[in-house]
Amino acid sequence: MDSDFHLIDLVSQAVAVQSLLRGMSTEEKLAWLSSRGTLTPMPKVQTDYPQMFWFETMTGLSCGFFLDGDEIVFLGDHTTFTVSDSR
């Protein structure tokens, strides 16, 4: 894991984070994020929904997301969105 990566805001740095985490297991990705902020699992609404998380960086910026393979899917008001690194 790249210990020199400073995570300020997961949403704006998502392309770089996805690139660094590509190919890691879900557990490894979550451990990487946990080492750079506070990661809190959200209660599951339905069993067939993916596990969602609330993440807060050490600078206090936060977002909700879930993982879909190597992609981070962010939760917004009445929407979900992803960022693309054109790979």
Image (cartoon, grey):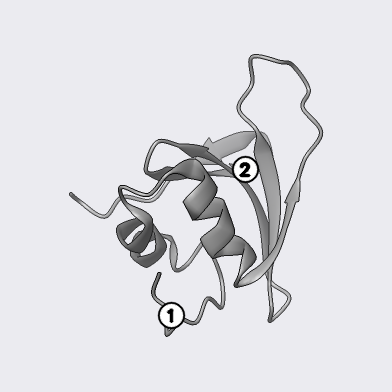
Relative side of 36 to 87, left or right: right
Identify the residue at image location x=64%, y=44%.
Answer: 76
Amino acid at circle 2: Leu
Residue 71 position by quadrant: top left
Where is residue 27 drawn, in percent x and y?
A: 53, 46
Residue ID for mark 2: 75
Query: What type is the residue that disc 1 sits on?
Result: Phe
Give whichever of 51, 64 is nearer the camera: 51
Question: Nearer the observer, disc 1 or disc 2?
Answer: 1
Labelled disc at residue 5: 1
Check the image and report above or below for 67 versus 58.
above
Residue contact between numbered discs 1 and 2, judged by CB atoms under 8 Å: no
Say which residue appears at 78% left-offset and 22% top-offset. Answer: 45
Left or right of 56 in this view: 70:
left
Q: Where residue 20 sits in the image (x, y, percent)?
A: 34, 63
Tell me the element at label 1.
loop
Q: Describe the element under mark 2 as helix, strand or loop.
A: strand
Measured as percent of width and height from the top left, residue 16 is found at: 35, 66
Residue at the limit of the structure toward the left, as seen here:
87
Tally of numbered tags? 2
Quadrant of the image for the N terminus?
bottom left
Q: From the viewer's perspective, is residue 62 above or below residue 71?
A: below
The answer to whether residue 85 is above or below residue 49 is below
